[in-house]
Image (tube, rainbow, N blue to C red):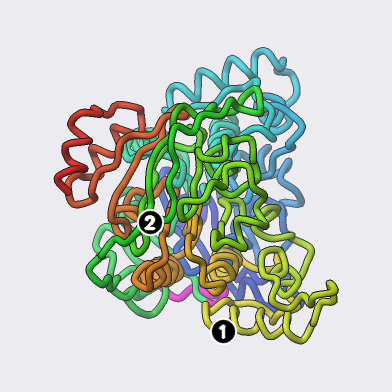
Amino acid sequence: MSVESALRLELRNISKQYPSVKANDRVSLRVKPGEIHAVLGENGAGKSTLMKIIYGAVRPDEGEMLWNGEPVSIRNPHEARRLGISMVFQHFSLFDTLTAAENVWLGLEKGLSLAEVSRRIVEVAGAYGLDVDPLRPVHSLSVGERQRVEIVRALLTKPQLLILDEPTSVLTPQAVEKLFVTLRQLASEGCSILYISHKLDEIRALCHHCTVLGGGRVTGEVDPTQETNASLSRLMIGAEPPALQRVAAHAGDVVLRVQALSLPAQDPFGTSLDRIGFEVRAGEIVGIAGVSGNGQQELMAALSGEDARAEPHAIELFQRAIGNLSPAIRRRRGLHFVPEERLGRGAVPSLSLAQNSLLTRQEAVGALGWISMPQVDALAHRLISRFKVKAGGPHAAAKSLSGGNLQKYIVGREIDAKPRLLIVSQPTWGVDVGAAAQIHAELLKLSDEGCAVLVVSEELDELFGICDRLHVIARGRLSPGVAVSKTDVETIGQWMSGLWDAHETEVADVGA
């Protein structure tokens, strides 16, 4: 058997040019049957474009692709799936108005009934430890729940090559381990896996080989099992991420107080909030952990003002009731908010970065409502420069940025406003280690300057790295707080299933 015929996938000198950037520049890649192959690179390195080329969603300008030793030209995702290639996108390809089962059904070959597809979803989701309700409409799902639908849809096709883009961002540590068992089993059966993740520990624990991209080119190939996080980071961004520097936390006065917050779900598939209570003080960072779909969306809507049904005193900002006030009034009082969904809520995809700054920043709006565009452009320039956003300038459309660079711009827009309370949901979802370190450093700096910070995240390493205290949300209920120094990742991972002991946690909190 020749070398070529022993390969599942081979890319030869693949190039793709967009108007303002060369996304892929003569990229070559080889993946063997049964190999779990990592593709590593910072945001904007060309990983997503390359994966879309393999999946038929983007046509390359140059280069050749071989599938099981034979040259192929994949014109669309349907042809890719027919060959045996499935992909889970970081930015999802689901129809909001359809149910999870209907979305999965669209991606499968004809001949299966919707009832049979629903049954198989339940079966596969259960086997892989993924909680998916096939009857729920996609518009009612959180970002994390949508990702689970994408993963199950891909697995149902029984692929020869499975492309996974940030697949573990919605899972508890225990569920990640279960998924890894499944992926290793798939690989042992001959399925090849292309694995994109910014979690270097995952790549080292799971993957057999790693191709590193930088500026659209292959900059290195390594055996990740022989590397350290530091060496992989150097390969990816040219340096190790800076160590987080934190001034000793001195919690000040209570900035945000939530007490007995109970709200019935507005959506029939949503999660009702049940007597939520916690505090965030000036100069501290409080984290809320939890598996997506356990009430995070509902809590964020209540805190940001998108859902103003709460009793006024259920949410207090500087001892003033705000539970029934609008987002604009809350912003004027010092509360700024970063939603989990970048495109569509954090930014309008078709608008420029400058125009998107006006969503929450009103400095350039005069008393009579006139907008000073030079001021708007200057603000966007400052955000791009300060937060090292890779973009084609203030007039670049939000949708033209990589996910990580758009996230830096949105987080930066709110940090730059000098908030008194910053609430951030999933601050580094899909962000490379360099950008994540930058965002974490900015949050720590903000806290050191006296701002109260609330971080909602499913990344436990992130929460343990920057938070002073942690809560866990499960099925609309919130655990008592616990000092980060008094707990560990395994314990919080168990609590994410709702398994906390209130008495013991209260004792730990008091003793913090």
Q: Nearer the viewer, residue 341 or 168?
A: 341
Residue behind mark 2: 199
Residue 83: quadrant of the picture? top right
73 with respect to 303 (left or right): right
Q: Which sits earlier in the primary sequence, circle 2 or circle 1? A: 2
Residue behind mark 1: 385
Query: Residue 399 at x, y = what percent?
Result: 71, 63
Which residue appears at 57% of the width and 61% of the height? 333
Q: Magenta region, mostly helix, strand or loop? A: strand
Which residue appears at 64% of the width and 40% of the height? 307
Which residue appears at 20% of the width and 44% of the height? 487
Residue 275 seen by the camera: yes
Q: Nearer the viewer, residue 206 or 483?
A: 483
Which residue appears at 69% of the width and 76% of the height? 363
Relative height, residue 355 to residue 176 (above, below): below
* Residue span colored magenta: 215-220
